[in-house]
Image (cartoon, coloured by chain):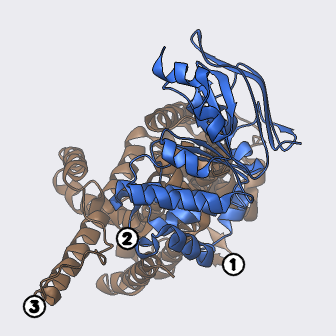
Chain colours: A blue, B brown
Amino acid sequence: MAQLQIQNLHVEFGGLRAVDNLDLTVEEGEILCLLGPNGAGKSTTLDLICGKTQPTGGSIRFQGTELSGLLEYERARCGIGRKFQVPSVYKELTVAENLSVAQSRHPGMWRALFTFGRGDTATQRRVLERVGLAEKAGVKAGNLSHGETQWLEIAMLLTQDSQLILMDEPTAGMTIQETEKTADLFRQLRGSHTLIIVEHDMSFVRRVADRIVVMNRGAKLAEGSVEEIENNAAVKTAYLGH
Amino acid sequence: MTRKLSYDLLAYAAFAAVIFWLVPTLYAYDGFELNTFARYLSLAIVAMALALSWGTAGLLNLGQAATFGIGSYAMAMHLKLRASDGLPDFMGWNNVDTLPWLWVPFESLTFTLLAGLLLPAAVGGIIAIFMFRARIAGVFVAVITLAFLVAFQLLVIEQQGLTGGQNGLTGLAPLNLFGWSVDTYSVGFYYLVAACLMAALTIGIYVSHSKFGLILRAIREDAERTRFFGYNVSSFETMVFCISAALAGWAGMLYTLVLEFASPTYMSVSFSLAIVIWVAVGGRESVIAAAIGAIIVNALEGRLSDVFVEGWNLMLGVTFVLVVIFMPRGLFGLVTYLAGAGSRLRQSRQDSPKTSAPIGSAPHAQGGR
């Protein structure tokens, strides 16, 4: 059975159907890229999966569990992680402390109350080395550059180690080299983690995507491999408006 | 482990030396003078309790005086029963002829000590559950807790037969602690209060350096983001409210011992706001700084309010405004800023023969905003 099954999902914001009867299936370990013009409902779809937005109707099943009705933290505990479009790290905390927060295998309150100190620093150091922030462990996250902030949030998601990771424009604001590094990193995650990535940068998508789903006006327009999508007439029409 | 923790432990040791050794020496072990200082120390506990919820989690509890008052009344009820034969005197004046059920268990000291901690925690917890489940945050927490405080004080004043109304509970017996009849004007009592403050600070430092404290700081910055890591934000917020309320109740019990009466003014809005001022002056990010802030402001008040009877409240208000504008992080912020500036200066002196500036090793100490 597929890891994530979305059926007939829809959400309305004041009469506007941001997501309209969406069906989506994601297999374990694959990298799925969500494409589409602005306002197609890509970010809203991620919001619906992680619980930031509650759907008007339809079903989202993750590993057999129905997610609709669960709160954000309960979904996170099911194994869903989210990276936001605007990098959201804790600016007043140091880089290491940010990772400590992300280390949330045991997110219970009592457990936290009886845990003293920084947590598993070895894992934190390993993750920081992987994203190239090892030197900055003691720096306040607010003092990082934009690209470094992106890396920090990616590092936090690696630390959180969710089975399903939702990435909203992970390469925005990155240099070409940084984007390549991100692509390499994501390819390493393939197999062990499932990724759903919203991204505009086609060269990045070509590098990482196993499968592409194109959305338009809240619904699925096309689905397939990179070549299939690039030669799809309906997709060209949606993007170019002919 | 971290530099921050070692700084905190250093400050903790220095603070312990001051209140255990320096202060008694300065006052020449005079019980009467030390009683005044014991009052400041008990108020320091309620200040550090507020710093825990306000400084760490960003939840400004303007109803801190209510939980402080519950603690102080719990202790006063026990001592009042010890002082009276059967029914406390004020009940007779109010035509109450049997001991109300609420008073009965306060015959027991063990119950009183537990109730002085757990009742405030329960009250704080109930308010917190309602607020934080509904995801109320920011200034609305302050508004709701303030409204609760006003209602609670009215309730206490209204229930004359139960609480002594405006007069509060006076004519209390001395506390008998395991056969030691506590003399409020003794050096021993001063050390009891000082030890309680150090114990409360130990709890405060533990909490702020635990994973729990880290998550609270994360919640202060971005509660929404924290939920997506699987943390149940409202349970963390509720817990810190309970801990803070229990510490406030503890402070209230000691305060009753120091002053030998309990009064509804302990639950007044002006007292609750005064706690906020003490914490703001000291610095809300550190429990020790908040305690020091409470001691400094109250010591000043002790000296100045005799001279400027009418003007003191105005001076306190102006101090608060000045602190908020020029020193938003309090004395703590000032000290860390100066320490940071000092280490930067030293670093630039060391580096002056070389041409390169140390970019990678930028100082960690945070400057003022």
The residue singled out by tag 3 in the image is B353
Q: Earlier in the sequence, mark 2 or mark 1?
A: 2
Looking at the image, residue B331 sits to the left or right of residue A27; the answer is left
Q: Label 2: chain? A: B
- Residue A145, can we see it? yes
On screen, B87 above or below B347? above
Q: Which of B209 and B86 is in front in this view?
A: B209
Cα–Cα span, label 2 and label 1: 25 Å
Question: Which residue is found at the position 65% from the left and 57% from the top?
Answer: B117
On screen, B183 above or below B253? below
Q: What residue type is labelled 1?
A: Gly
Q: Label 1: chain? A: B
- Residue B264, can we see it? no
**Residue B305 percent location from the top left of the image:** 23, 54
Q: Earlier in the sequence, mark 1 or mark 3?
A: 1
Q: Which amino acid does label 3 sit on?
A: Pro
Q: Which of B221 and B92 is in front in this view?
A: B221
**Residue A211 percent location from the top left of the image:** 68, 42
**Residue B184 percent location from the top left of the image:** 49, 71
